[in-house]
Amino acid sequence: MSEKTVIVGLSGGVDSSVAALLLKRQGYRVIGLFMKNWEDDDDEEYCASRQDLLDVMSVADVLGIDVEVVNFAAEYRERVFAEFLSEYQAGRTPNPDVLCNSEIKFKAFLDHALALGADCIATGHYAGVRENAGRYQLLKAGDGGKDQSYFLYRLNQAQLSKTLFPLADLYKREVRRIAADAGLHVALKKDSTGICFIGERPFKAFLSRYLPPQKGVIRRLDDDRPLGEHDGLMYHTLGQRKGLRIGGLKETEKNGEHAAWFVAGKDMAKNVLYVVQGHDHPALLRDRLIARQLSWIAAEALRPQWVYAAKSRYRGEDAPCVLASVGDASCVLDFARPQWALTPGQSAVVYEGRVCLGGGIIASAENTVEKGKRHDV
């Protein structure tokens, strides 16, 4: 093949490092790029960007590639973090990784790479891309346990046409073995977690720096009984169990132990947090969702009344569903079985086999069984 230039987003982790290694072995001219996107508390223990950069430079030295360091902090704050805070303030639970990918890793980074003359970019994501009949498809990774297509569903044709995912068919254990065999010291480095580019940190304390606490009442949904006090609705999400600071009551589960409490709803106007007891409480189960801010990878809407599968959370299963209706602004998904804690602000991502078709942001959910609207999927 003729030598093409690919700029690889290097994070300092094993995945992006092996992505760069594999591309170099395939004959590409590889350049590394390290993105610095968060500066508010760069000196604190939770922000590891300095160590990550050292790891990137060490890997680049072994691979014999150049590295550019680019600061996208302004773009990140404007395009990702501002939306992140706005969603929490509205009582929803956003997924910053989805927005971070579409706005920073595959927009700001891609634009920068193309301006430098690169033919394409690459990342260490566990996902795949292929061309089919002149259109580009986003595919699930070979390693189902690490698949990240859920976070990439907002990518468009232009972005996918310029993107390589070298780890598409590899399992994590193979990636670590390849890194170790190549003498990369990051072979056993722990995977990064937490908020995209911000890292893992005590979430409530972090969020309170930007959204001041606003105390309110915690009430039991079934009878409106007050149970305690919350520090702010933005600190809680549907299905949340930990951090409620309310004990079990007389209601018990079959094993005789106190049933756990779960967040089941929010009243933003009254600043009330509603909870229920028991993981399978009916208030936590919904078989229909409405999604907005739609993004279809093929740049066209899906077929109404067609059977697909959808994920309503990253670690959730592909759940059979019917696309009950779809328009430019919203779509309705009816699930074969009720889904647990469908959460406004999270993404509903639609699949057909291995192909990720796109999706949208969950706006609301309901139970059609209660309303007599249920149909078989």
Image (cartoon, helix red, strand yellow):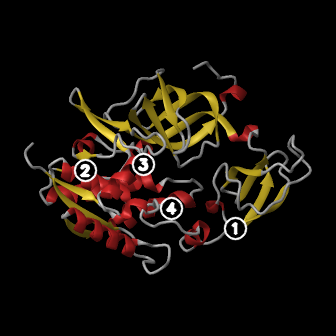
Cβ atoms at labels 1 and 4 below 8 Å apart:
no
Q: Is residue 214 visible?
A: yes
Callout 4 crowding tier (Cα within 10 Å): few <14, some 14–19, many ≥20: some
Q: Residue at x 48, y 79 (%)?
A: 44
Q: Residue furthest top?
A: 376
* Sequence-first tag of 4 and 2: 2
Quadrant of the image occupied by residue 143: top left
**Residue 45: percent from left, percent from top:** 50, 77
Q: Residue at x 79, y 55 (%)?
A: 219
**Residue 35: percent from left, percent from top:** 31, 66
In the depicted structure, whether residue 182 falls above or below residue 370: below
Residue position for label 3: 172
Tag 2's secondary structure?
Answer: helix
Tag 3's secondary structure?
Answer: helix
Tag 4's secondary structure?
Answer: loop
In the drawing, what numbered circle is on residue 231?
A: 1
Q: CA distance from mark 1 to mark 4?
A: 22 Å
Q: Residue at x 38, y 74 (%)?
A: 51
**Residue 196: percent from left, percent from top:** 44, 60
Residue position for label 4: 194
In the drawing, what numbered circle is on residue 22?
A: 2
Cβ atoms at labels 3 and 1 below 8 Å apart:
no
* Three-letter code for the amino acid on which mark 4 is drawn: Gly
* Three-letter code for the amino acid on which mark 2 is drawn: Leu
Tell me: 140 left or right of 227.
left
Q: CA distance from mark 2 to mark 1?
A: 48 Å
Foreground tag (4 vs 2) = 2
